[in-house]
Image (cartoon, rainbow, N blue to C red):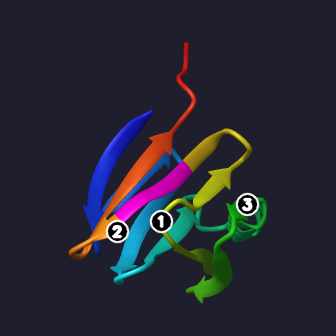
């Protein structure tokens, strides 16, 4: 688990194929862009992985991005997003254009 401060435009890698980009930080919520990196011919797999993302109490929608989709999640403080049932990103605080995020990523033995 790690705690990181991120501002708009910053990116966090949760796995070799999963990245989260901070698209915007507002007074009361942060907008996150979730994308899975796959081969250029395998957009269906990436889109299926995005469909498995679970957001607890946040609003989210898919946004087409040149064939592959990006999941956009709007989170308030205290809300979290779960990826593949193992990795979790929680928004701890939002202040002065910076979001403090707690990343829970399984460790590999």
Q: Where 47 sits versus 37, above or below?
A: below
Q: Which mark is residue 33?
A: none
Q: Nearer the viewer, mark 3 or mark 1?
A: 1
Residue that appears at 43% across and 46% down: 102
- Disc 1 crowd, CA 10 A, few/some/many (<14, 14-19, 20+): some
| Quadrant hosting residue 6 | bottom left
Magenta stretch secondary structure, dominant: strand
Q: Residue at x 46, y 44 (%)?
A: 103
Which of label 2 and label 3 is nearer to you?
2
Disc 2 element: strand
Quarter occupied by the C terminus: top right
Q: Are marks 2 and 1 in contact (CB under 8 Å)?
A: yes
Relative to 91, 80 lies left or right = right
Q: Looking at the image, how many numbered discs can be counted on the residues?
A: 3
Q: Nearer the viewer, residue 56 or 43?
A: 56
**Where does label 1 land, which residue?**
77
Residue bearing mark 3? 54
Separation of marks 3 and 1 at Cα, in angstroms: 16 Å
Task: Write down the residue under mark 2.
Answer: 94
Q: Which residues are magenta?
A: 89-93
Residue 9 point in image, percent of width and height: 29, 73
- Give the left or right position of residue 45, taking residue 33 as reference: right
Give the mark nearest the N terminus, 2 or 1: 1
């Amino acid at each position: 688990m790690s705690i990181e401060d991120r501002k708009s435009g910053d990116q966090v890698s949760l796995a070799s194929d999963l990245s989260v980009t901070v698209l915007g930080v507002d007074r009361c919520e942060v907008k996150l862009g979730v994308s899975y990196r796959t081969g250029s011919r395998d957009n269906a797999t990436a889109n299926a992985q995005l469909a498995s993302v679970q957001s607890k109490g946040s609003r989210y929608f898919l946004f087409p991005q040149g064939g592959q989709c990006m999941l956009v999640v709007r989170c308030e403080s205290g809300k979290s997003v779960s990826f593949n049932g193992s990795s979790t990103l929680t928004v701890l605080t939002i202040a002065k254009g910076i979001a403090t995020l707690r990343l829970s990523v399984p460790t590999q033995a």
